[in-house]
Amino acid sequence: MATFELIQGDITTIAVDAIVNAANSSLQGGGGVDGAIHRAAGPGLLAECFQMNGCPTGEARLTGGYDLPAKFVIHAVGPRWRGGNHGEVGLLAATYRSALALAKECDVRSIAFPAISCGIYGYPVEEAARVAVDTVRKHAAGMPELERGIFVCFDEKTYEAYDVALNTAE
Ligand code: ADP
C-alpha cells in the first residue's frame, strides 16, 4: 500500500523511479514544468520525444530520465481549463490514470506528480488537487508494487490546496 507525501519544490530534483511531466500534446517541450524537466534531463529527452507522434489529452507516454535523478519520465497531457463544462474533470482524472497505468507496466515503486493543468492550462487549483488526490489514491490501491506517491507543488498556493485535498479525501 503506497503512502502519499506532499512537498513544495522542484520536481526535477526528486529521486524517484518516475516523475510525471505536465506535457502538451506535441511532446516537443514547452514552458512551466515541461521546460524545467527538459532543461534538467538534457537533449536526449527531447530527441526521444521527437520520435513519438505526440500524445492526445488524457493520455501519457513513457521515456527515459536521462540526466534527471528519476529513471523514467511519464509525459502526461492534461486538459486545458475551458470553464468546466468541457469534460475537464474526466480528462484530468484520465490523465492521472494513464500516467499510473504506465508506471504499473514498469513496476515503478515511487512516483512524483506535478499539479497537472494548474499552470499554463489554467485549471483551478483546489478542484485539480481534489481530482489528482482522489484519482491517484483510488488507482494506486490496485498497484501493490507502488510504495511512494509524491505530490510536488511548486508554490505555496498549490501546496495549500493539495494539503486540503489530502487531508479531506477518503
Ligand atoms: P500545464 O500546462 O499542465 O498547466 P504547467 O507546467 O504550466 O503545466 O504547470 C503545472 C504546474 O507545475 C503548476 O502548478 C506549476 O507551478 C508547476 N511547476 C512549474 N515548474 C515546476 C517544477 N520545476 N517542479 C514542479 N512543479 C512545477
Image (cartoon, grey):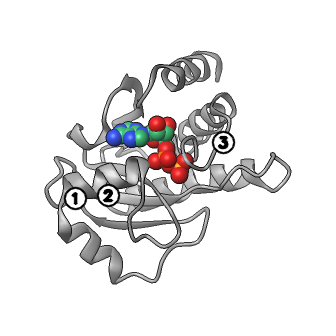
Disc number lying in front (3 or 2): 3
Q: Which residue is painted at 30% across and 35% down in the image?
A: 10
- For marks 1 and 2 on the same chain, the one whose residue lies earlier in the sequence: 1
- For marks 3 and 1 on the same chain, the one whose residue lies earlier in the sequence: 1
Q: Which residue is mark 2?
A: 73
The vertical placement of 83 against 104, above or below, is above
Cα separation between marks 1 and 2: 5 Å
Q: Which mark is residue 123?
A: 3
Position of 106 with respect to 23 (left or right) is left
Element marked by disc 3: loop
Amino acid type, residue under disc 2 in the picture? Val
**Quick check: which quadrant has ligand 1?**
top left
Q: Which residue is painted at 68% across and 56% down in the image?
A: 91
Position of 152 with respect to 39 (left or right) is right
- Rendering coords of residue 14 (x, y %): 24, 38
Decide if ligand 1 comes within 8 Å of the CB at mark 3. yes
Q: Nearer the viewer, residue 25 or 112?
A: 25
**Quadrant occupied by the C terminus:** top right
Q: Residues within 10 Å of mark 2 (few under 14, many from 20)?
A: many
